[in-house]
Image (cartoon, rainbow, N blue to C red):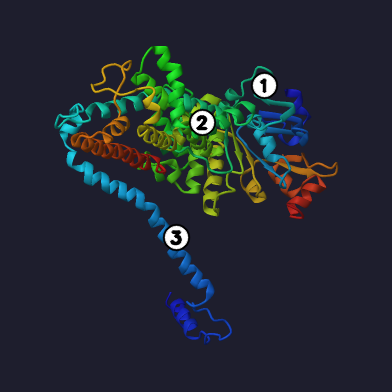
Amino acid sequence: MSTAVLERPQAHSASEAAINCRVSKIFYGKFLAVRDSDVLIEKGKITGFIGPSGCGKSTVLRSLNRMNDLIKGFRLEGEVDFLGQDIYAKGVDPVVVRRHIGMVFQQPNPFSMSIYDNVAFGLKLNRYKGDIEEKVEHALRRAALWDEVKDKLKASGLSLSGGQQQRLCIARAVATQPAVLLMDEPCSALDPIATRRVEELMLELKDDYTIALVTHNMQQARRVADVTAFFSVDISRGGRTGYLVEMGQTDQIFEDPHEQLTKEYIRGDFS
Amino acid sequence: MMAKAAKIQDRRQSRPAPSKKFNLRRNVLELRSLRNVFLTAGACLVAALGAVPLISVLYMLVVKGGARLNLELFTELPPAGFEQGGGIGNAIQGTLATVAIASAISIPIAILAAIYLAEFRPEGPTSALARFLSKVLTGFPSILAGVFVYAAVVLLMGGYSALAGGVALAVLMLPTVTLTAEGAMRMVPQRMKDAAIGMGCTKTQVVWHVTLPTALPSIVTGVILAVARVAGESAPLLFTALFSNYWLRSVREPTASLSILIYNFSSMPFENQIELAWAASLVLVLIVLTFNILSRFIGRPQV
């Protein structure tokens, strides 16, 4: 693992890897969706994935906790190293992987149960023995939602506004304290004010969590991500195959990209 | 604020005179308007016509059966020909018992089948076949369900019984409950299931903690409607539960039921029994109606 880290671009060789993803190919059936994408998710940082539609950024993200296993014909060549273990190795239980690598989705998706039960869901699932009430409150505070819902914890999670629902989903995800939090365009269904709150939340959560964030919004990556990975889509060989163009500190990617393609994308030549 | 209001006022006053070129007023004599009026009236008429049988039956039941709607009706056994008074207590008991047996048999099987169809194998030949057979079974003549259970249970057990009646009704409930439960589970948004999977749920946990609770109101509605439907069945009970003039003491005995009692007593020459048949009809309708109303309340979206 250490050698792999050393081979990476100088910028982030110093910090520790939470997930070291070395994808050489991802297929959906016969369709090659992503190729050659080595992404290093560093501990305690926010890693932003940006790129045009169809560039495979979501596919890569969802491969990091084996959510893609649900899709028929999904096949990954390469490995995804999570703290020293390849999560695609034989004998690895995807269910256990997902308990350590949590996920927040594009559409807020609270369960049709009370706010309290939504947050307590993962704790009960893991047969948490301690004070669930305290944990729920902590998670809701962490997600900056406590003040808004403390008087109606019994109300349905679906009765909240979109932005609140998304923060509820974040509370639900952090309640079990996963090692890594994957966020798949968490703000794309939210209005600007709710987006801002979720972004602030991400920055706060950074102290305790490692976050990987897919965003369609370049400016969002610029605002919150420490490290940015730029993906693009290669249509030269007939298909539409996504790949990692360049990855580095966010400032470097936005101000001094090494690749011409990155420069054009940042400038807004294509999207 | 004030300035804005003034501006709007200003704009209103300065609106130009209506154009002659575009007439936006409604013309009642236009063909389109006439057709609209005609079709609306027609639709109302047909809707009213559809309600006539229901209203008239309810009216007749209340008028003819309402008089006997007292405590005796529920607590007494049916009278013999020349007796006065009496009730339909054992028929109510029998109907409730057979329906309960039918539910106990069919609901678990139907829900498990629905879980398989909706969650574990939505596609594939087994599911396609099961779904097709369920649909066929929904339209299955109820008397044939009775004949089937006569052969499968009555002959085997050596006699008519409440249990056999329950099995026959279960056969009728099974496809409806399966298909409605499957539909209800399919309506649970995929993103909710994704959320559960993303939290590290196994397939079983997803079904148990997310899909089933979310779909429960609709499933309960389906169950109640199925129960309401079989509560009024008579044909399948003829061959299975038969009838009895006494209280039901064991599920291995034949039992009375409201529908069969209505059938029996309505063709009797005795006024008292005919009155009881009316009262039993009213009770049966009220039971079914209660179930239907119940299903409306439970099936309401929980949000």
Residue closest to the far right? A237
Amino acid marked by disc 1:
Gly
* Distance from Cα at disc 3 to Cα at disc 1: 71 Å
> Which picture quadrant has residue A182?
top right
Q: Nearer the viewer, residue A267 or B252?
A: B252
The amino acid marked with disc number 2 is Leu
Q: Residue furthest front?
A: B269
Per the image, the residue denoted by label 1 is A84
Q: In this rendering, do the residues under marks 3 and 1 share a single chain?
A: no
Which of the two marks, 3 or 1, is nearer to us in this view? 3
Give the letter of the chain under mark 3: B
Task: Please tell me which residue is depicted at 56% across the width and 46% down the height of the picture.
Answer: A199
Residue pointed to by mark 3: B43
- Looking at numbered disc 3 in the image, what kind of residue is underneath it? Ala
**Is residue B83 visible to us here?**
yes
* Residue B153 in the image, given as x and y percentages of width and height: 42, 16
Residue B271 has which mark? none
